[in-house]
Every structure is written in C-alpha cells, then in structure tokens.
Image (cartoon, rainbow, N blue to C red):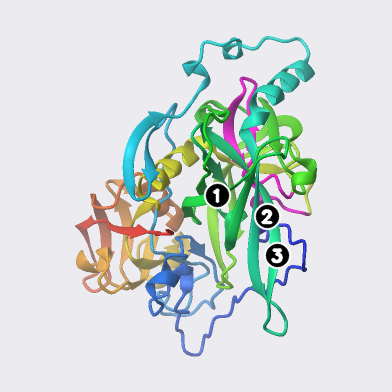
Amino acid sequence: MDFNNDNINKNQENQGQPVNNSYDDKTAEYPQNLGGYNFNSNPQEDEQKNSYISVKSLPRKRHWFRRALSYIACIVISALVGGVAGGAYVNYYNGGSINKSYTFPSTSDQNSKTNSISYTQPSSIIAKIAAETGPSIVGVDTEIVKEGFFGQNQVAEGSGSGIIFDKSGYIVTNQHVIDGGRKITVTLPGGKKQFVAKVVGQDTTSDIAVLKINATNLPVAKFGDSSKVRVGDLAIAIGNPLGEEYAGSVTSGVISGLNRSENIRTDDNSGNVRSYKLIQTDAAINPGNSGGALINENGEVIGINSIKFVDSNVEGMGFAIPINDAKTIIEQLMKNGYVSRPYLGVYVVTITDELAKQYSCPAGVGVDSVQAGGAAEAAGIKAGDVILEINGVKLPTSDDLINELQKHKAGESVKLKVWQKSSNSTATVNVKLAEKSQQTN
C-alpha cells in the first residue's frame, strides 16, 4: 500500500519517486536516515522525521546484529500518545501563550433531542445527522509551490476537509492535507465565506493538524468516544470528495473493523513504514474526504477520515483515525504547537525464536545501534544487547516495545530487562526517557 497524499493536483501530475530499499551487504552499514532519523542531518530536517519501523531483507549469516536479520526496525522511539475517553481537557494555543481551557463538545454536554435518536428508517437518522453535523465540516484548500522540470516554480492546488471543534475558529484536519502549503484557505459550508487559515500546529506522525481562522460563533462538531464503537455500528462520512465542487457530500455504511493495523510506507524514500491503528468502514471515503468526519448514530465524531490509508485496489475499505487518539494530539498542538514524545534513541531488530537459537541469544528486541547522547546510551545499553522486558512486560517484537512506550511520557523512567552481550548475562537498567518533539511553528 502506497502512501497516498490527499492533495488534488489541479495543475500538474504527481511525480512519484521510487522507494529506496537498498542495503549494501558488502559494507554492512545501515543508511544514515534509517527509520526516519538522520544522525547527520540538520535539526530542521529532523523535525519532519518520525518514529516507525523500517523493514529490510538481509541475508542469513553470522553477526545478526549487523547483517543477518529479516527485519530491521529503526525506533527513535516516539510513542503516539494514547486516546482519552470522553471530553479531553485542552488549553488553547494563541501565539505561544495559553489563554483559556475547555472540554471538547460532546452529546452529553447538550440537553437536546440528539442525545437519543430513535428512528425506524436509517435514512431518517442519516438525514438528521447530516443536517446537524454538516455545518461544522469545512473545505480546506492549499496552494503548494513545486519546482517544474526546468527549475521554474509552479503553483499547485490541493483540497481536503476539516472539522470545526471550537466556535472561535479552531479546526482539525489531516496533516497531509496541508503539508507544504504556502497558503491555506478554509471554506465554510455553502461556499460563500472563505478565510485564510493559520497553522496552530501539525504532527506528521499522527497525521493531525490544527488550524485557526478569524471567525466566531461557528457551528461545532460533537466529539464522541471511539473506544465505545462496535463493529456493525452505523457510520456516516461527511467531507469534500474531489474538492469544493462536491462539498458537504454524505456517505454511509457500517463500522467494518476496529484497531486495524495499517503499515504505510513513508514518503521520504527511505523504505521505512509506519504502523497505525484505525477504524475501518465501508462508507465511501474519496480524495478530498481526508480531514472530514466519521460520525456515529448519535451525531458524534468518532474518527477523522483519511484517504492516506485507502488502498486504491480495494473498494469498500475506508479508514479513519480514532477520535480518542486525535484528542490528545489536538491538546498538545493547541498548547505547544507540537507533540512531545518519549524515545530511547536506538535502532532495533526483532529477534525471533529461530534467530535466537541460531545466534545463541535470547528472543526479544535486539539493539543494533545506539544513538550517541541518547537515553539508551546514558543507561548503558549497547549494540548487541537484547531488550527483554519493559516494566515487567515481555517484548517479543519491536512493535511491543513501541506499544509499551506509548503509555509513558518524556522524562519518565522505565525499567528495562536487558540481556547484555558483553557479559552474556541479564540485568535490569533504569532508563529516563528523553523527549522527541516535532516543532512545526
């Protein structure tokens, strides 16, 4: 599955570049930007890199830490912050300062008839929800400057959708919708009012961005609780498929699956992939729908639609970022303008039972290399070690390590059970997790 960008290029065709999956077995050296972290790059470039797992095919030989492993996973571990049930307490971001706080609007906050919808005809429910929630779904258009074949600048345009979550003009959308945009315009339903938007913050790892327009008393979408979503529940998608010409389009279906793991190849030509846990629906999600709302039968937003995760070869499979995951990202973007994540600063590999027998080491998460000055190095972890547990939780794979680190914050200390290659013994080490921030403003 390729990494789809939701921008609709109206002036030129997309020019994709092949993904570099090469590995030089003669030198047995890993690419400097493996896993999206470039040890020799400048800080501005590093801000755009994220944590994910890089999968490479390697020959089966001795010295497994450098050459013979089937899967190489680069983790400059930056955990996606987990979801928050119900309304998350959020601080507004305004020019680098915090000026007030609020809870996300939800159905339970309102004494309206929408708290309990009872209809015999599904079409009546859909029509009512579309009328109530539709006004809070906006169009997001971007101007992107790209270099032409002869070096001249060309202006391309892209379209997506957004969700108003605060009446004073705050909007959430997908980060890839606005990525690279020199000018972002928000169009309210009806197409008569347009506003130039400011980027409050954006996060490529979660694919979430927050925008601000100079408007007040806007209609606001109600955020639900994605942890309560069930397979088979009604799903309604509202957005702007194919741009403003089809603004406010409504499609419906059911929730087809939960916690779907989608491994998406990144767009940095590194060969890396990133794993997401998503809501699956058969409601149509088309180009331009990204950033729009996936809504339940109570009229609550339960997910943020994203065309990024859609396989063009498969029909009837749309995906949305769970709103509980998005809430905490929104909170940090509003407060700081970026998302802070904990990380270890290591390149790791998954050591299966088969490989463990072959190379006379325990199964777990093998440390291939350690970032200089990082948290792991400070704790004495070295290349060749194998991480077995974190706070007593066993770690069969690199994904398990990522999932456990998602439960912690930068600055917290964790206990790692580590098999040390140098002594062929197991020890418990305390690691103070460092911070990886993605400053975007």
Q: Position of residue 158 (x, y in %)?
A: 69, 57
Region in magenta: 287-312
**Which quarter of the figure is the N terminus placed in?**
bottom right
Residue at the spot x=71%, y=26% of the render?
130
Mark 1 belongs to which amino acid?
Ala
Taking depth in this image into account, of 7 and 343 the one nearest to the observer is: 7
Q: Residue 156 carries which label?
A: 3
The answer to whether mark 1 and mark 2 are in CB contact below 8 A is: no
- Residue 297 part of the magenta segment: yes
Mark 2 belongs to which amino acid?
Asp
In the image, residue 67 sits, relative to residue 197, either above or below, namely below
Residue 206 seen: no
Residue tagged 1: 197
Taking depth in this image into account, of 107 and 226 the one nearest to the observer is: 107
**Which quarter of the figure is the C terminus placed in?**
bottom left
Crowding around mark 2 (Cα neighbors within 10 Å: few <14, some 14 to 19, many 20+) is many
Q: Position of residue 133 (x, y in %)?
A: 64, 27
